[in-house]
Structures are given as structure tokens and as C-alpha cells.
Amino acid sequence: MLTRSLKPKGRFPLPWTRPVLPYRRCMAHVSNVSDIPSEDTKPFNVPIPEDSFETYNLDPPPYSVETTKSQLKQLYRDMSLIRRMELAADKLYKEQKVRGFCHLSTGQEAVAVGIEHGITRDDKVITAYRAHGFTLMRGGSVRSILGELLGRRDGICHGKGGSVHMYSKNFFGGNGIVGANVPLGTGIAFAQQYDDTKTVTVNVYGDGAANQGQVHESYNMAKLWELPVIFACENNKYGMGTSVERASAMTEYYKRGNYIPGLRINGMDVLAVISAIKYGKEYTLAGNGPLLYEFQTYRYAGHSVSDPGTSYRTKEEVQAERAQDPITTYRAKLIDWGVFTEDEAKAMDKEIRRHVDRETQEAEKMPAPPTNLDVLFEDTYVRGSEPQQRRGRTVDETFYRG
Amino acid sequence: MASLRLPRLIPRTRRGYSTAASPSSRLNLPIDYKSTPLLHHTSSTLSDTLDLPSSTTSKSLNLYQAINSALRTALSTSNKVMLFGEDVAFGGVFRCSMDLQTEFGSERVFNTPLTEQGIVGFAIGAAAQGMKPVAEIQFADYVFPAFDQIVNEAAKFRFREGATGVNIGGMVVRMPCGAVGHGALYHSQSPEALFAHVPGVQVVMPRSPSQAKGLLLSAIFESKNPVIFMEPKVLYRAAVEHVPSEYYTIPLNTAEVVKPGNDVTVISYGQPMYLCSAAIAAAEKALGASIELIDLRTIYPWDRQTVLDSVKKTGRAIVVHESMINYGVGAEVAATIQDGAFLRLEAPVKRVAGWSTHTGLLYEKFVIPDVARIYDAIKQTLEY
């Protein structure tokens, strides 16, 4: 059953049967998980494949992670929920209900989900513009995220921002300027150290942002002051339409901190991500200073919905990556381990689809922001600079007197 | 209790007046770029306006095609011209550099990493060696990491070189700017006023394809200063007109009187020129006034004389721009007018500009100027 989706279906060798990547990604090869308890909440260890990590001046994290059956199922549910939500967002955009920009994270779900399950709700996360999955994991609801995309008042940020701009408790966005969130995350970590909160900041940015100067400025400050921050480079292999090899003189992003220990992680394996993040949190909170993580992952969609993502990469490449899909490989693994059955998985899929459909309908029903000056000038600091208003014959002809 | 119905004491009356304006008198209609007088819909008016020989051939192009044509002309004219930026090799997100890498090779047209500060600093260095680098910043909203390089390095380069006489003329930083309807916080801004505060850079914003080509070629070949070239991205596809095929330039130091008039002067640049034109047409019809429209084209240094001459004639002035009103270009123009044409003024100089707030996803239309606001300003100024 595990290998069903991987068997070549035609006469020709399929692209993923040959090594297309400079490094090898681990498939869900069957690991001997003996003695899986029947109880949902009883802890046990699951193995992590040996080639999940590459280290730089750092001992590798444990090659197993303690979990429960209910958590393993939750991981599947979370990843599938992000996938479904992103597909719903894509559909809303194509129906021209979502305007503006929309950056989907399909293919990268294991990173957002793994990070969240490796930390606690008191830890902090900050990321760049591909933020939907992180927002959901940090406590946003599907409807509040889709509502935000639709620009509705009940969206997670009052519909002011749309795709890129989403925030929730202990989640600092969502930032439209590439690399600009990295110094912010470093400052957040400084406050954590200053207040001795025993929490960590996961400071996420992309491979494209890794070439911004302020990212390197942040490395230096973080190491200088030994801040509890994990720099997490989400390497999806393309900064917009430019591949990492064309944009970076050195593509081993986990070594780029030089004086900061680094770790490259198979970002398609949610369990490897969890193990790495748990380990990293312990490491930084022990006063060892920052870490530089690189999650190797892949974005199925284009850079944004207006980019079909086909002009700078081959169909074969996308196909090969899809064969290592973080959700389907994980699903096969859970079935193989007997965590759930195929039927249970199907039921869960169905339930998730229904949930997202329901939430999409709710989001579409949300009212547009009211057209008044209080809303227009909300949260800006120049009180009293609002224009005088005179009602026009129609809403769009309302006059403001300057 | 909710189901309890109270008897209606006051009978409901029907409203006896219309709540909607008649469609023919509505002002905020979408701009019809096919009929606006600001575009050369035929080639016949081109040679006069741009001072070109009547044998000039032209092609109907939209703004991104005109930019592409200007870049192609520049790359063909001099081997010193080079073009780079994020995703530029594939044509750029707005297709302005389509096919140029194929035509001119990857030594001259190439992608850079996502590194705005690096891109601009790199351009300054190349220009200091006599190259003519055209750097693209993908959106004007992304230029701020490069602000230090522009303000402290590019702007001061010629000044500080002193006796060596070296300058970085030929360096152009192109960036799409302005609102498109749904850009939200990081894809809507128009930061021309921030650059216009800095002596040493020239800031240009064209209103149309033919203007864009002439101004861009001027920026590359005829300036001794670095030029910030801002392209209103809403016009990339919307504005289509005849553009001369050959090399031509439009000077970077002259505003253009686009439409003459006697009673009010409206001063603008970039996309709001079209809103002004529509408001002027409506106001001339309804109020019987004659209104002059001026395109600044170069926002810094700007053509004070043309503006002052016009205001001395009309006695009234309105400045219109899309970016925020606070400390904007309108403030500078208004101050210059009151200084240079005070005794001729019949009314205070008005500013119609974006409000001082950020651009929420669905809020853009409430923030930036529209035809109704410009019309209202004209009416108030005339009736003052």
C-alpha cells in the first residue's frame, strides 16, 4: 500500500526514479515501529530516517521523536487542512473574489505544522509573505484567513491586508518585504532573553530573502548576544522565478551563519521538522545562542497566483517533487504503522474538506468593511487629520473637503 | 419577546425623491483610455508634440511595451547600457524586459538575487566606471532597503567627487509604483516625495507610453545625475497609444502644458493626469470655465517657471497627486506658487491627494483622489 502511489505506471522510467536532486530526500521507507500502543494518548517513539539531517558545527537532533497516536493524527489533519485551505484560496482567487496578491504554500505544509508542534503557544513565530499555513497553525481559523483574503472586516486583520498580512497572538506575520522580518524576529528574541521568558523565536524566511543584507546583520546580532532564536530558512528552491543556484553563490543555507551552528532538515518530513525544532529550542534556551536551520521543501504553486510557475522549471521537476509530497508520504507511513486505517484516513479527508467548504461559505458571507472615516483612519496616529466629509449623491461620489 | 409585534403608530411613507444620480452626471466612472485626450490615438499628433520629423514611424504600444521599446533602443544604442533586477531575465513581473536577454545576452540583461540594497549599490559602482546601468526594483514598495544607497551614495556621488568630475549619470532606477485597485500595504505606494527631498537625484514619473520612452531615454543618455524613474503600474496595460519607433528624448527639466486654459491651473503627474482630464472635461461643461492642465513629468528638480507662468495667468491652482498629502509634492508646489505668484492669486492653492493613512486591501478607492474630489476642488477654487 505504501508504495502504491510510487510504482511506475508506464513503460518509461518516471522522473523521480532517477536522482534529480543534488541531495537525497528520504522517502517514507518502512521503519520498524514495534509496540505502537493502542491508546491514543500513550507516548511512544517513532524513528526518523537517518538522512533527514545534515549538520554544520552541531550534533544532530535525535533520530526519533516521542509522540502519541493522537498527535500523529493531528499532524496529518493539520497538514491536510492547510492544503485544503490553500486550494480554497486558489479557487476564490480564480473566481476573482480574492483580489491582490495570494502566495500559496502547497507543498510546504510540513514546515509550518512541524514548527508549531515542536514549540509551545508561548514561543514566537515570525515569517515572510507565504504566511497562510503559519497563521492557521498559530491559532487563526480557516474562515478568518479566507475572510482576510477577501478583504472582509471579520478577517484576521480586519481585511486591511489580505494575503501577505496576517497576525495572531505570538505570531508576528506575514511581512511583505523580503528579509525585513528577520531583524524583527531577532528583536523579539532579545526581548525574550531580557524578560527571561524561557521561550524561543522561530524566525522564518525564504531562500530568496537569505541574500538580503539585513538577514546577515541579524545573524551577527543574534550570535553576539546569544539570543534564543532559530533562524529558519524555508528553502523551496525558488526565490520568485529564480532558482537558488542562479541567485546564491552558496546554496548551503544552513552554513551561511558561519559562526552560528546550522542544520539542514528534510522539510518534507513533518516528524524530522518536529525533532529538529524541539532540539533547537532546548539548545538555544540552554544559553547556547542562535541556530540556523534550513528546511528543504518545495512549492508546488507559482510564486503567487499570478505566476503559473511553469516558465522557470520543468513539469518533470514538479512531478518528482510531488512524489515526495509531505502529506501523502506521511499518510502512507501512518497507515503502514497502523496509526489509522485507509478508511479512517479517507473519513478524515472528507471531514476536512467539508470543514473547509463550510468555512469558505462563512468567509464569503462576512460583510465588507464599512465605508466610514473611523475605519479608514483606524490605527493611524495622526488623529484629527481626517478630511471633512460631505455625502455625495452616490457612495463613490462622497466628497471630502481637504 | 422577539416575536411580539407592536402596532405601527406612524404609517410608513414612501420617499419622494431619487436616491441615485442619473448615470449621465456621474463623475467617478472608469477612465476610458481609448478616448482620453491625453493619449495619441493616431500617429498624426505625435511629431508636433514630441518635436520629431514628420517622417517618424510609430507603433501602437501600451506602457510596458513602450518601456520595453525604450530599453531595447537604449541597449542597441550603447554597449554601456545594462539591465538587471529581480526576475528581469524572464521579462520581469510586468513584462517590461521581455525578450531583452535573448536579444542582448546575459552579460547585459540579467537577474539579480533579492537584494535591493545590493542592486542599487552595484548600479552606482557600475555607473562610476562609465556604465549606464538600468536597475529594476520590482515594486516601488521594495525600494526602501536601498534608500541608504540612493540618499547617501547615489545622490552625493557627483557632488563629492569634486575636481575629478566623475558622475554617475546614466544610472537609472526603474520601479513600478502606485495603486492598481488591490495592492494593499506593500504593492500600492508611490514614494516620489521621499526621493524628491534629496538633492542629487532626479525623480521622473511619465503619464503615458510615448512620454515614458522619451523620458527614459533621456534619463539614460542625457543626465549627469542618477534618475529615479517611477512607472505607474496601473497604466502598463491600460494606456495604449502611438509611440515613435526611433530614438527620441524628452528633456528632464520641462513640465508640459497638456491642455491650455484661463481660469484655473491643475498641476499633476502620472496616472492622476487622467482623473484630472476627466474632471476638467466635466467642470468645463458644467461650470463654463476654461481650465489649464500641466504635467510636471519631472518631479524633482521641477519646472517652476511653467507652473508659475500658468498660475500668473489663471490666478488659481490645484495640485493633484496620488501619494499621501502630508509633506507631499503638492506642499512643495503650493509653497512655490504662493511665493512666486502671490499677488496674482485669486484663491488658496488646493491640494487633492491621497489621505494620510495606509492602503488597506479594499480601502484604496477611499484613499486616493478620484474625479469627484478633483471636480469638487475645481468648483470650490472657482467659487472662492
Image: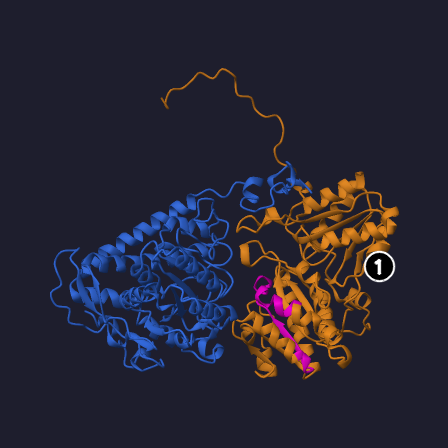
Chain colours: A blue, B orange
Point 56% across, 40% down: residue: A374
Position of B303 compared to B60: left or right?
right
Point 11% across, 65% down: residue: A35
**Image quadrant in which the C terminus of chain B is located:** top right
Point 56% across, 44% down: residue: A376
A295 and A200: which one is in front?
A200
Position of A88 compared to A369: left or right?
left
Image position, residue A30 (x, y; %)? 19, 72
- Is B47 located above or below residue A188 in the figure? below
Residue extent of the magenta highlight: B127-151
Position of B290 compared to A6: left or right?
right
Point 67% across, 72% down: residue: B154
- Is B381 located above or below residue B273 in the figure? above
Image position, residue B130 (x, y; %)? 69, 82
**Magenta span has A175?**
no
Task: Name the residue type under label 1.
Answer: Gln
